Amino acid sequence: MEPTIVITGATSGLGRLAAITLAQQGARIIITARSREKAEQTCQEIGTDRVDAFLGDFTRLDDVRRIGNEIAGRYDHIDVLVNNAGLHAFQPRTTPDGHPEMVAVNYLAPWLLTHTLLPALHRAPAARIVNVVSPAPPSPRTASTPASTPPASAASSASPAPSKKFSPGSGSVTLRAAPASSSPLPPTPASPDTPAATTPSAEPARSTPHHPETTRACKPNSGMRPTDSSNPKPGRPPRRCAGSTARHLTPLPPEPEGHDGIRVPSQLPTARRSLKISGRRWHPPTRSSGVIRNKTARHPTKPRQKRKQWRRILLGPMLAIAVATPAAVLGSGAWVGARADGHIYRIDDVPDAPVVLVLGARVDPDGTPSSFLAARLELARQLYENGTARAILVSGDQGSRAGYDEPGAMRRWLVERGVPNHKIVQDHAGYDTYDSCIRARQVFGVEHMIVVTQSFHIERAVALCREAGIDTTGVGDNTVRHQQLAWLRGAIRERAANIKAVADIITGRDPSFLGPRQTGIDDAMTTP
């Protein structure tokens, strides 16, 4: 009776070669494939009527279960199941079932197919399940193999021999994925320390003639340099390994014999493997009285010396940072204070200006301005109602994250409190104070204005806007000073922001988004 063999992933590579070979030996082949064209091509290459193909996608577990049920329903028994289908995804992908693609194809699909076909496998007299695995390649590659000649790199072995017909109960099948190279792997060389097997009557051979004042020949990987020992002078022993010394060396006994005449390595004394230091140099290892002596390389730096070196390396940068940071904070603060000196007023005595600029601050998730931002908006509303300013420019962040809109929230707050909508102009790209000042001058054409913010922030705002070319005065707010923690946090942050302000002025950077000239302020000024 011909065996029935199911092979997954049989449209290319090792699975296709296995399907062709087993079909030639007289087996009925059942293959699974995702592509109808590849399945038909594989069936034509096999060239017999004893091959059936089932189509399905192994990334979908429903397809795997369906294929298993169809195979189990058509065939009364299955002799061999070869789980060969697999992939290596170089980009993480997710299957429609929500599993990682590699996990679904390489692990879940073979398990589910095996579980579905178990009843048919149990009905076979001696069923087998073969799982084929291979290491993933280091880079994406594809390999095509002619259908006529199997590649030299694909290794497959079967017991009994391939020349006989395959019988499920007489042997096992092992399929291995070989390296991509067609050349065979070189044999692994034997270790020089591997014991050699001899006959019981054989005399143990010594590697070199023993001499009372010499050691035996240098072993590979022993850290010793062999020297030329040919043609020694008459009456003198052969030359020793380079770097060894003839004093205080104990002759090595011959290797003892074990059971059945097999030579075993001599048991070395359990000596302490420590370095015997001589000055600042250490010796290549030689075995003498359990001590390893070295003389050919410099002694490694001691841990204490390494710590001192790291201290010297890190001390300079740490001192520079410790000196530069306070200097930068004090210097930038002094520059900001000097630039804004004489231009900060109370709300009652601030000079008139066409525009009042409100700098943005945090907006709550429900679209309500925070207490700090509401205090700034209240100052702007009072300046507009008093006639000190005729238009309000609200500048803030819009679009840095989904649904966040500072200018829109400020406009709604002002409109709800009686400010006409056409007197409010929005700047949607005021991501920081520097951007708001530069855009007020270059995008909206403002030449004279009042800026309102908290008192710990007002000096930097006035300084930056004046550096942008705007005749600026400022009004600071202290109504939220009772929120001590938030106020302290803002005051501390302002010290670092002063350094950034000076750097922005020195470098003259452009705003994050400049954009074309807008006439919103001009329209608000001319509209009654």
Image (spheres, rainbow, N blue to C red):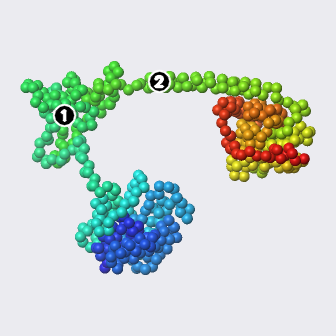
- Give amino acid for label 1: Ala
Asked if residue 361 can be seen in this view, the reply is no
Q: Is residue 335 above or below residue 440?
A: above
Q: In percent of the image, x 29 and y 65: which residue is there? A: 150
Q: Secondary structure at mark 2?
A: helix
Number of the label disc, if any, that sits on residue 217: 1
Number of the label disc, if any, that sits on residue 85: none
- Give amino acid for label 2: Gln
Q: In percent of the image, x 45 and y 70: which residue is there? A: 35
Closest to the observer: 318 or 197? 318
Q: Is residue 342 above or below residue 387?
A: above
Residue 262, percent across and down? 18, 46
Residue 279, percent across and down? 34, 19
Q: CA distance from mark 1 to mark 2?
A: 42 Å
Residue that protrudes farthest toward the left in the picture: 234
Closest to the observer: 258 or 298? 298
Label 1 packing within 10 angstroms: few (<14), some (14-19), many (20+): some
Q: Which residue is mark 2?
A: 309
Q: Is residue 42 above or below residue 409?
A: below
Query: In the rendered view, does 15 fall on the left or right side of 401?
Result: left
Look at discs 1 and 2 and give the one toward the viewer. Answer: 2
Residue 295 figure quarter: top left
Q: Quadrant of the N terminus?
A: bottom left
Residue 332, percent across and down? 69, 27
Residue 268, percent across and down? 26, 35
Q: In percent of the image, x 79 and y 46: which residue is there? A: 519
Residue that protrudes farthest toward the top in the picture: 279
Closest to the observer: 17 or 522? 522
Closest to the observer: 264 or 98? 98
